Amino acid sequence: MSEENDNVAPTNNENDISMEEEEVTQETAGNETENQDTSRNEIVEKMLKEILEKQKNFETSLVDKLRSVESELQLIRDDLKPKTVTATVPVKADSENTTALNSENKSATMSTTGKHFILKHVFKDVSNMKENVDHWSEAEEHYGVKWRMYVCRKKEHLQLFLFCSKPMDTVNWSIETQQKGVFISNRVKNKVKECIQQVFDKKTPSWGWMKFIEWAVLEKDFFVDDKLTAEFHVKIEKTAGIYKDNLRNFDETMEEFSDVVLIFLAVHSSYFKALFLGQFQESMKCEIKLTGIDADDFQNYLELLYGDNSIDEFTVEGLLLVADMYDTPLVIGKCEEFLLEKSKKTLKKKLQLSMKYHLEALNKQCRKEIKSIADIKSVLPGDIRDLDSSITTEFLEIALSIQ
């Protein structure tokens, strides 16, 4: 019995030792597992901190970008606000003006049909303008001629002038105009002065008002962030020496072919078809007077219909005006082709013409070239109301996509 006990006892001790070793091993394994879990938690915690930090930086960057977009969009919204020209109380014309017939603030007298355009500019840092220093707008091309405006401080007044650049290399040229100068205010009525007849030529390339507005009034009512918004509304009545020589005669020497000319016009223009072949009273007259167009523009229009190449940088806008007035698709198509393939006019001018005369291919080409906010600002017209709603929306989409 004792031997058995002796024999058994050592076996039990061995088991006890084995169990203790197993417990130690399990405890060690548990510690290792706990250490691994702790290490894993630290890694996860570190990763979460990094993710949170990146998210925080991303949110900050996103907010900055959104603020930048909002700032740019606000500038565009400001430009897109329609400006209303309102006449002020009439006063006597300035004695310093030239002998051209003038009237003050007759905003309803100047027709916007025919060759009409608006020149707009925002003068900056106006309060620091020094006396006798001219401040110029950029040149804009309208009907083949470049126009600019400028202001100049003279003691207690600010002068406003319109300048006509010499067209081509012609020696004798003249442009008869009506014009209206406007200072825009968001606090009082706009300051408006009007000249009902003025001729620009080699001797008189600029014209304006020596005392357009008192400086004290300007500072009080017309400065916005030290900026002054000015406009010139111009109607071209008659031109001479601007365009090339005529390629074909359509005067009394063509009398024996007059019926052919009329039929030719009727074929290409729904307007003339109704006028010559319809039931209108004018169709019975031997002579029909066409109003609201320039004689040179109509000459170029007839030449183009007869197959002569009368389109160039100087004539294309006048041609479009006549062709649109008389509904002549052939002429409109040739003008659009010239603007698409040959013209060196600015993007702003091409876009303006595409919208005014519904030139879809030209409009599409122009939109493809607008790729930045700077491009958007560069093509905004003098009168923002000339922009249709579709392109205004597209401008906003471009601004958002850029950011």
Image (cartoon, rainbow, N blue to C red):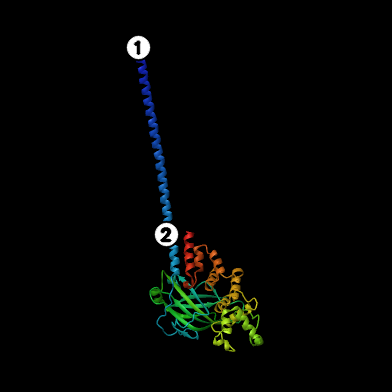
| Res 239 quadrant in image | bottom right
Query: What is the number of callouts on the image?
Result: 2
The residue pinned by badge 1 equals 4
Percent across and percent down for residue 280 are 54, 86
Residue shown at 41% from the left, 54% from the top: 60
Q: Secondary structure at mark 1?
A: helix
Quadrant of the frame with the N terminus: top left
Percent across and percent down for residue 311 are 62, 75
Q: Secondary structure at mark 2?
A: helix
Q: Nearer the viewer, residue 361 or 52?
A: 361
Please report whichever mark, 1 or 2, sits nearer to the chain's N-terminal start.
1
Q: Within 10 angstroms of label 2, few (less than 14), some, or many (20 or more) residues?
A: few
The residue pinned by badge 2 equals 67
Percent across and percent down for residue 130 are 45, 73
Amino acid carrying mark 2 in the image:
Arg
Q: Please determine whether, in this image, residue 328 is positioned above or below residue 16.
A: below
Q: Please determine whether, in this image, residue 394 is positioned above or below residue 15.
A: below
Amino acid carrying mark 1 in the image:
Glu
